[in-house]
Structures are given as structure tokens and as C-alpha cells.
Image (spheres, rainbow, N blue to C red):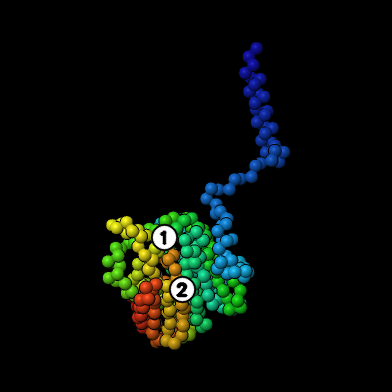
Amino acid sequence: MNPQPHRTRKLRECLSLALFAVLFGAVPIPPLQAEETSVPESATWSGLKPDVFGDRTIEAAHEIVTIEAPKRAEDAAIVPVDLHFNSGEAAARIKAVTLIVDENPSPVAAVFKFGPDAGVTHLATRLRVNAYSYVRAIAETEDGRLHMTQTFVKASGGCSAPAMKNQEEAMASLGKMKLRVFPPKASGTEAMNRATEMQLMIRHPNNSGLQMDQLTRYYIPAHFVQGLTISQGKRLIMTMEGGISISEDPNFRFEFNSNPGEEIRVEAIDTEGMKFEKQWPSEPSAL
């Protein structure tokens, strides 16, 4: 007698029972494993938070501030970061925002403070990211509360990446500034209620102190823009206290309530005590 038909019949019966069990819950289905690309928890932040904010409570942002950055950076030395602020009537005014890169040697990238009637709703800049890290924005509202949002960026080596220019070339254009003023997004708006977008570009190597001169093989001393003030007429738009995490040739794009006809003035100072100043008309212009 040939046992093959009997074995085939038994195999079909086993497969049918297994299918029945899966469909009707008799056999538990193991949970799906987390993807390898999932974002890990940050132990670094637990130790970092008290150093920067002490024992102050930090709440979730809840759209008071949002952050955007690439999940995987094309260039770790120039990582674009966009912050948007809720300017709705129900939201308390944001008076300052701290930008932090957890895993950078100097995690606090910058602290921005806004003028009381500047109405800043958008701020973008470029950062160095030294290792896979959370990038955080902690906004302080005028009632003294802190609100945090964060995103995870995959990048490495940004703080020690070679400069795009050699030192002689960088020093030759040191402190040169350019301002681009974009046309208003909405026409016919009131003078003090018109959102204007601007982009400030500053020529500066912003050396981190971790970069190596490829000829001498010595580390290039830290030299970066540490202070920045942007104002319109007698109105303060914002100030910045910066560190080594701001990229070479600092670039800031921001949107605020512009006062037509009043000049924009920028003052910057670097860690060598060098001061740079310039002013421009506030009307839309081309690069």
C-alpha cells in the first residue's frame, strides 16, 4: 500500500487546523517587532535638562512651538532646522526659545529672545549635528512656563567636519552680511499686522574648535558668532546667544510683524570681540 496519499491528507488537515486557529484566536499571534529605524529614548536629556533649566517643569509643546528637521541629514555640518510658533490669541506670547542638540559636545546651540511686539512666527537656521541625536526646541512663554518639542536626526561628525573654505578665504570675507526681504504673503494687510519674511546671512567660519587644519594637523581654535541683535527702527525683533553648533556662515530666516518704512539693523559680535554692523531698508529685495 502506498502511504503517500495518507500523508498528504494528514498534512492538509494540519494546515487547515492551523489556519482556523490563527483566524479565530486559538493561537496567539506574536506582536510585531519594532522597526530598527525607531527612535531610541534619550538618556542624555535626563542629565542635561537640570544643567540648563534646573528643576523647572517642562511641558509638552502642544503646537505652541513645532520643529522640523530631516530624519537623515545630507550634510551633518549643515542641518536645516525650522521652528514655527503659534501666534493665536489663545496662546501666550513666546518670549524666548532654546535650541538644543542632545549629543553635541556643547548641546545648547542657541538661545533666541524675541521683542515684545515683534510677532515672530517662524525661525529657521542651520546646525551642526555630531551624532545621532534629538534636536529640541524649548519655548518660554511670557507667563514663565516652558514648552518642549523635539525631533530625531540621524547625522554624525558635524562638529568636526572640515570647513567649506580655507581659513584665509574665510577671514577675507569675515563679517560680511546680506539681508533678503521677501514680499508679504498677503496683500492689503495693516502696517503693524503685516508678516514679513527675511533671511540674514553672515560670512563667518564659526569654527567649533573640533576641526583640524588639514595642512598643519593642528586643531583650529574655536571662533564663532556668539551674539546677534536684529532690530527695526527702535523695535527689538530678536537677539541670539549662539554656540559652536550653529553652522559655518550663519543663516537665519524669520517671519515677523514688520513696520513698513523702518530700516532693519543687525549687530553681531564673535568670540574674538569683533563687531559687525549693517542696516538695510525693509522693502522686498532680491539677493
- Which quadrant of the rendered structure holds the N terminus? top right
- Which quadrant of the rendered structure holds the C terminus? bottom left
Foreground: 25 or 176? 176
Foreground: 268 or 236? 268
**In the current view of this chain or complex, which residue is farthest to the right?**
26
Visible in this render: residue 178?
Answer: no
Give the left or right position of residue 93, taking residue 196 as reference. right
Vertical order, 44 against 94 (above or below):
above
**In the current view of this chain or complex, which residue is farthest to the top?**
1
Q: Residue at x 63, y 19 (%)?
A: 5
Q: CA distance from mark 2 to mark 1?
A: 18 Å
Counting other residues with Cα less than 10 Å from the Cα at mark 1, is it few (<14), some (14-19), or many (20 or more)?
many
Circle 1 sits in a helix, a strand or a loop, which is it?
Answer: loop
* Residue type highlighted by circle 1: Cys
Give the left or right position of residue 140, taking residue 162 as reference. right
* Residue type highlighted by circle 2: Glu
Foreground: 240 or 25? 240
Q: Which of the 4 quarters of the picture holds residue 149?
A: bottom right
Residue pointed to by mark 2: 241
Q: Residue at x 56, y 74 (%)?
A: 140
Circle 2 sits in a helix, a strand or a loop, which is it?
Answer: strand
Q: Which of the 4 quarters of the picture holds residue 142?
A: bottom right
| Residue contact at pointers 2 and 1, CB within 8 angstroms | no
Residue 183 at what x, y percent from top left? Answer: 40, 77
Picture disc at residue 159: 1
Dot 2 or dot 1, earlier in sequence: 1
Q: Residue at x 67, y 38 (%)?
A: 22
Visible in this render: residue 150?
Answer: yes
Give the left or right position of residue 11, taking residue 237 as reference. right
Residue 281 at what x, y percent from top left? Answer: 36, 83
Foreground: 134 or 90? 134
Q: Residue at x 35, y 80 (%)?
A: 277
